[in-house]
Image (cartoon, rainbow, N blue to C red):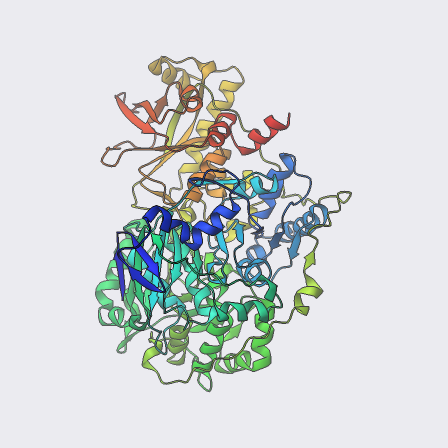
């Protein structure tokens, strides 16, 4: 089904070639990725890209912070189309006016600075971007990790908020030219197999080994032509879970049809790799061999065919239970009870968001359920169309009626089920979701408080087949139905009536409307000559997600208030972290005020360091942090609590490392094989770190001061910083960097 090749290959006339009449150096200039990236780079150096994007998009748990940073740094208007969507805080209410205050702020910002404002429940961020921002050959930046529009011929990148702030200030996204990996598609999917099946299979094949980490995936081959555009979009959006940097597909008449259907035919261009394009690696994916898949907790790569899972459910669920119990000792996990009456039974099905809520997914789910019933038992099915135009078309063709008649519930456009806000299952519930992630807590439970629920990812087709059987997990290939391909008709009037489109027409005289929860960022200090940090959390998991660093769900309501949000940092993974970090921050505040508490004095004496030259704060160690969401709060909350460094063996994604740098957090790494036997309460002293960063040194000698009195040497690294990134760290954060240069 999927074969990985860790060697280069040429592509000529749609076929793979081991040799070519051109060199690999020449051949790599013939990829789609090369042409688009170089066209957007202003560096003049093809190996060191400095990208300016064509458009941007943010949602309502990121845009407040981004705009606050940008205006504090001197922004006067939005220089490129910038869509502010409201698809995350729509249902994260914790009481009061917090959520709607953010939305009102968003509209006032769009009016003042010349932006695009998409009201709540009109569209999820990526649906609107596909419908209204994407264009062949364009590049789009989004403050959401699933910013992927490669299937529409647009290279898109998900990053943390500070990178969008840079674009608003007419700066650049800086990255070394990435490796480009060919995904060579052949065959055609069988009936009952959907885009999530192919995507989950791909994630399973590449994630653990890091085969495509920070690479660009370029999709080509004879299998592309047979895929409807929604199928392509459904695979493409899940490339984020491979940890790749971006994606791009060759385009054809199917792509043209998408743009024409949306009244934007001028955005279409035929894109194909040049003859003898060269790729650093390649993946062969035979779509005809893809089977219905299920991804078990706690990652999309923990995947099996549904048939394999059903045949070995006792063993597989036992492993999930053991993993959950290890992560969450307070929880009482009983997933094995789902096995009874000759099957495995789920409690919930959800089809939603930028991956699941697409027109074709929902119409085929309706084809499966037409005339059937979800039953009157514990199983429920909720369907969230990805935008109001999609919902309207589903209503016109009768698909929505077919689903409602079966017992499914149609809900408004909303990303909540993908990150744990809405549709939270009952304790020990098992939810099947055509959404993007099944990380811990993404279903909204609080296992640290004894609650536990589990999410498995499945395609909409198999979720509908399961619903037809009352919750008994069933691959869609094992039921009889006839899918009907329906043309999609986009009604532009929906957006014309409700979306504020102000790009190019700022109203500088209007005021921002700031509710009482919206606050400015606290003052950040520049990096001192020496750094002394206390370990406030030591995480030994193989990978630590951003959802563990800053939980999603109801915390989203506080994302416009840095201080209140910071109280949730690591709360579901290391509840003691906040208290430890705040204690370190309190000592630093006293140091800045000229007072050196006894604990800090004792540590400084051990280091032989002067208080006026030595910054004190907290630090997090994790083996490989930052998989998952792009949201900057995973880093900014650490900084707000006085965090000055992260130590790891490798960062899971570029975007999390960038977030750390932009918030002035030193991104220290260790050589693989270096032991790190230290625990919370131990300290790390890094002398002359300011000079080392200023001079571009990458090997950083440090010393560990154990809480028990022992001391050991430790070699840290800070590799690959650009000149600008070094300045940002020295200044203390990106906001300081811009403020200093404005002065």
The foreground one among 541 and 19 is 19
Which quadrant: the C terminus? Answer: top right
- Residue shown at 27%/78% (left/top)? 341
- Expressed as whole percent of the image width and height from the top left, the position of residue 336 reads 27, 66
Quadrant location of residue 440? Answer: bottom left
In front here: 606 or 499?
499
Q: Position of residue 376 (x, y in %)?
A: 44, 80
State the quadrant of the N terminus.
bottom left
Q: Residue furthest bottom?
A: 371
Q: Nearer the viewer, residue 525 or 213?
A: 213
Query: Does residue 89 appear to the left or right of 680 in the view shown?
Result: right
- Residue 383 % position (x, y): 50, 71
- Residue 539's image quarter? top left
> Residue at point 28% right, 31% down?
678
Does any portion of residue 25 appear in the rendered image?
A: yes
- Position of 649 relative to 468 (above/below): above
Q: Residue furthest right?
A: 509
The spot of residue 244 in percent (x, y) is 39, 51
- Does residue 568 appear in this view? no
Number of marks in the image?
A: 0
Residue 212 placement, left or right of 86: left
């Amino acid at each position: 089904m999927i074969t990985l090749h860790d060697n280069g290959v040429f592509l000529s006339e749609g076929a793979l070639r081991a040799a070519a009449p051109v060199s690999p150096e020449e051949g790599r200039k013939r990829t789609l990725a090369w042409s688009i990236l170089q066209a957007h780079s202003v560096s003049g150096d093809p190996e060191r890209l400095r990208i300016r994007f064509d458009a941007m998009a943010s949602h309502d748990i990121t845009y407040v912070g981004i705009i606050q940073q940008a205006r504090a740094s001197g922004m006067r208007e939005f220089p490129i189309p910038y869509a502010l969507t409201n698809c995350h805080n729509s249902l994260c209410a914790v009481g009061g006016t917090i959520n709607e205050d953010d939305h009102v702020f968003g509209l006032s910002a769009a009016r003042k600075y010349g932006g695009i404002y998409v009201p709540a429940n009109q569209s999820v961020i990526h649906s609107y971007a596909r419908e209204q921002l994407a264009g062949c050959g364009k590049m789009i930046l989004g403050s959401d990790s699933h910013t992927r529009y490669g299937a529409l011929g647009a290279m898109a990148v998900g990053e943390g908020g500070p990178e969008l702030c840079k674009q608003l200030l007419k700066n650049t996204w800086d990255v070394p030219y990435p490796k480009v990996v060919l995904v060579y598609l052949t065959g055609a999917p069988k009936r009952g197999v959907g885009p999530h099946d192919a995507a989950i299979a791909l994630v399973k094949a590449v994630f653990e080994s890091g085969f495509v980490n920070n690479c660009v995936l370029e999709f080509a081959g004879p299998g592309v032509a047979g895929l409807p555009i929604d199928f392509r979009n459904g695979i493409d959006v899940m490339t984020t879970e491979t940890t790749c940097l971006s994606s791009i597909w060759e385009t054809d008449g199917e792509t043209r049809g998408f743009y024409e259907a949306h009244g934007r035919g001028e955005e279409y261009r035929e894109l194909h790799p040049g003859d003898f394009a060269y790729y650093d690696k390649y993946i062969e994916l035979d779509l005809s061999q893809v089977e219905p898949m299920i991804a078990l907790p706690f990652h999309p790569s923990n995947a099996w065919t549904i048939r394999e899972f059903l045949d070995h459910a006792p063993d597989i669920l036992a492993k999930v239970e053991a993993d959950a119990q290890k992560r969450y000792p307070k929880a009482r996990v009983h997933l094995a009870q789902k096995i009874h009456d000759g099957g495995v039974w789920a409690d919930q099905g959800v089809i939603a968001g930028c991956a699941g809520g697409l027109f074709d997914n929902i119409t085929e789910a309706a084809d499966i359920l037409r005339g059937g019933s979800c039953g009157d038992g514990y199983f429920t099915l909720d369907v969230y169309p990805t935008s109001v135009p999609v919902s309207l078309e589903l209503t016109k063709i009768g698909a929505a009626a077919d689903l409602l008649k079966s017992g499914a519930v149609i809900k408004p456009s909303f990303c909540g089920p993908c990150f744990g806000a809405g549709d939270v299952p009952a304790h020990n519930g098992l939810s099947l979701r055509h959404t993007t992630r099944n990380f811990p807590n993404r279903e909204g439970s609080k296992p640290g408080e004894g609650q536990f629920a589990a999410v498995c990812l499945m395609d909409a087709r198999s979720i509908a087949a399961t619903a037809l059987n009352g919750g008994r997990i069933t691959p869609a290939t094992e039921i009889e139905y006839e899918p009907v391909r329906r043309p999609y008709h986009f009604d532009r009037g929906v957006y014309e009536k409700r979306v504020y489109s102000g790009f190019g027409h700022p109203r500088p005289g209007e005021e921002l409307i700031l509710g009482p929860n919206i606050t400015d960022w606290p003052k950040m200090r520049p990096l001192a000559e020496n750094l002394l940090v206390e370990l406030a959390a030591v995480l030994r998991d193989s990978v630590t997600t951003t959802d563990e660093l800053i939980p999603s769900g109801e915390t989203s309501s506080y994302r416009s208030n840095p201080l209140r949000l910071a109280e949730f940092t690591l709360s579901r993974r290391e509840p003691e972290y906040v208290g430890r970090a705040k204690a370190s921050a309190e000592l630093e505040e006293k140091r800045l005020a000229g007072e050196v508490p006894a604990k800090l004095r004792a540590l400084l004496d051990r280091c032989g360091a002067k208080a006026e030259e030595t910054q004190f704060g907290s630090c997090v160690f994790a083996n490989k942090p930052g998989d998952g969401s792009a949201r900057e709060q995973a880093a900014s909350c650490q900084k707000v609590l006085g965090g000055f460094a992260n130590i790891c063996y490798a960062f899971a994604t570029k975007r999390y490392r960038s977030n750390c740098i932009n918030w002035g957090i030193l991104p220290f790494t260790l050589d693989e094989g270096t032991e790190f036997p230290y625990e919370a309460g131990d300290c790390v002293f890094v002398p002359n770190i300011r000079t080392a960063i200023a001079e571009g040194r990458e090997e950083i000698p440090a010393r560990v001061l154990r809480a028990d009195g022992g001391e050991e040497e430790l070699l840290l690294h800070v590799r690959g910083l650009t000149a600008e990134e070094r300045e940002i760290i020295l200044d203390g954060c990106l906001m300081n960097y811009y403020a200093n240069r404005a002065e």
